[in-house]
Amino acid sequence: MPIRKPWIQPTAESIRAIPAVVGVYEIADAEGNLLYIGQAGGREPFGLRTRIALHFGFDPGGDDPNAVLRERAAQFRWEANQQYTTKRLEMLMKFQRDHSDDGGTEWPPAHPAGDWRDTPQLGRLRRSRPVARSSG
């Protein structure tokens, strides 16, 4: 479920190389610790390129308002995906499952620093239980 691509260092060239498509992306710190799982939809003028450029200060509109990303974001990776909302929710649920000790909600560090519209309500991602078979 996570993006299986190498991390990319943010430069003007690497940002320009991102196509103007919808999809999902991950942002990490210099050590590769995941900070944020985001999406770029049809309302973004240049899709993924616009969203990722904002996080790394390459957007002429200004710096990212998210303090955690402003301070710690060091690399990114992205995936073009027409089902970007569903894919992002799956990625967040997997993060929650893998990082939550007591089953409570745990988000990547930059999510609580964002606004409420960026923090969706998630279901629980878990293995299904085997179905009991009856004899007869």
Image (spheres, rainbow, N blue to C red):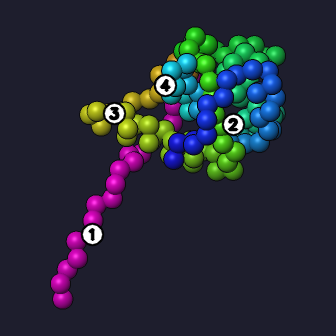
Point out the tag, 2 or 4, that comes first from the N-terminus.
4
The tag on residue 40 is 2
Q: Nearer the viewer, mark 4 or mark 1?
A: 4
Name the residue tied to disc 3: 100
Q: Residue flagged by tag 2: what amino acid is it?
A: Ala
Q: Nearer the viewer, mark 4 or mark 3?
A: 4
Q: Distance of mark 2 from mark 4, alpha carbons? A: 21 Å
For the residues labelled 2 and 3, say whether their Cβ atoms are less than 8 Å apart.
no
Q: Secondary structure at mark 1?
A: loop
Dominant SS type (magenta) = loop
Which residue is identified by label 1?
A: 131
Helix, strand or loop status at disc 2: strand
Residue appearing at x 44%, y 42% in the figure: 94
As measured in the structure, the alpha-carbon distance from the residue carrying label 2 to the one carrying label 3 is: 26 Å
Q: Nearer the viewer, mark 2 or mark 4?
A: 4
| Mark 4 crowd level (few <14, some 14–19, many ≥20, 10 Å Cα) | some
Image position, residue 83 (x, y; %)? 64, 50
Give the distance between the C-alpha atoms of the residues marked 4 and 1, in whole angstroms: 37 Å
Q: Are marks 2 and 4 in contact (CB under 8 Å)?
A: no
Q: In this rendering, does residue 63 appear at all?
A: yes
Marks 1 and 3 in Cβ contact (< 8 Å): no
Q: Which residue is mark 4?
A: 33
Figure check: 119 above or below 62: below
The residue shown at (80%, 33%) is 17
Residue 122 located within the stretch drawn in magenta? yes
Find the magenta span and give its range. 115-136
Q: Mark 1 vs mark 2: which is more N-terminal? A: 2
Q: Residues within 10 Å of mark 1 (few under 14, many from 20)?
A: few
Comes first in the chain, label 1 or label 3: 3
Give the mark nearer the N terminus: 4 vs 1. 4
